[in-house]
Amino acid sequence: MERIKKYLKNLFNGNISLAIVFWFWFVFISVLIEYFFNYNNNSVNFVIQSILLLYSISIFFIIFKSANKYEGNKIWSFLAKTIISINLFISTSYFIEVYKFNFLEDYYIEKEIKSLKGNLPIQVDMNSILVDIYKENKNIFYKYSLNNIDLSLAKNQNILKRKIQESICEDYNTTDLLKKDYILIYEYTNEKEEKVIDIKTTKENCPKSIYDLEILAEILKQQGML
């Protein structure tokens, strides 16, 4: 135990060989942490990234101290300092991203919307094309262009509305938004780009069973099916 304390003291004081500190304590240990704690769960990932950031900060100072005492070719101490500085920058940047994903809900959703917008327009089926998606406060708008569909009759509009809301209420991703009090608004225009119908969906439009989807998704994830 005393030997371990002495070794750690020398390590933090920069008295351990730069090669050992760099290749073992930085490269090897970082790879081990990434390998054994590679989770897809966002909340767990935040904890892991917090640990990695703390480790990156610690190893940053340790390597700098060891590099300052390095008596060999100064190019190696310079490279070690450069690499560890880049690593700390990347670790900090990634930690900030994970933090935003976990605690800044709007940031995550807006980033997803921005990613989707980059792939527009998307042919959804034979008669509809998703041409735009945007967010205003708690409202998320999906704009579709319709072809060869007659929605002049109220009956047809009601059929479309029922089908759209059934689809929304059965999808885990959209119900997740609804449960967070977002409102999904589907705007449909005809070939002349004239607005035909708006379909607004809130969690009140879905049965209480939408909360069962979350339980089902968690079971499937545990079984490796998601």
Image (cartoon, grey):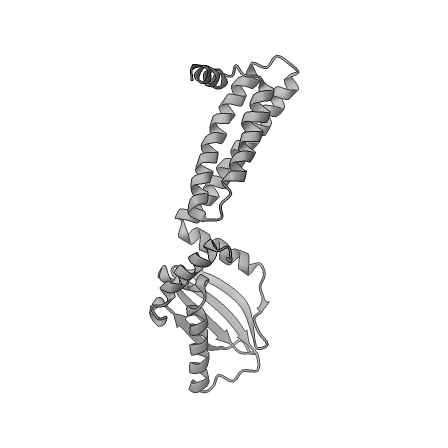
Q: Could you tell me which residue is drawn at 44 percent across and 37 percent down?
A: 50
Is residue 225 something one can see in this rendering? yes
Q: Is residue 92 left or right of residue 24?
A: left
Q: Quadrant of residue 83?
A: top right
Q: Could you tell me which residue is drawn at 46 percent across and 39 percent down?
A: 48
Of residues 204 and 128, the one nearer the viewer is 204
Task: Assign the N terminus to one quadrant of the image.
Answer: top left
Q: Is residue 96 above or below residue 172?
A: above
**What x and y, as percent, mark residue 71?**
61, 12
Q: Could you tell me which residue is drawn at 40 percent across and 52 percent down?
A: 105
**What x and y, as percent, mark residue 170?**
44, 69
Q: Quadrant of residue 191?
A: bottom right
* Farthest top residue in view: 71
**What x and y, as percent, mark residue 203?**
35, 67
Q: Is residue 207 above or below residue 21?
A: below
**What x and y, as percent, mark residue 145?**
54, 74
Of residues 56 and 201, the one nearer the viewer is 56
Q: Is residue 212 left or right of residue 82?
A: left
Is residue 99 something one can see in this rendering? no
Q: Could you tell me which residue is drawn at 51 percent across and 85 percent down?
A: 150
Q: Is residue 77 left or right of residue 4?
A: right
Of residues 89 and 214, the one nearer the viewer is 214
Q: Quadrant of residue 68?
A: top right
Of residues 96 and 221, the one nearer the viewer is 221
Q: Is residue 82 above or below residue 159?
A: above
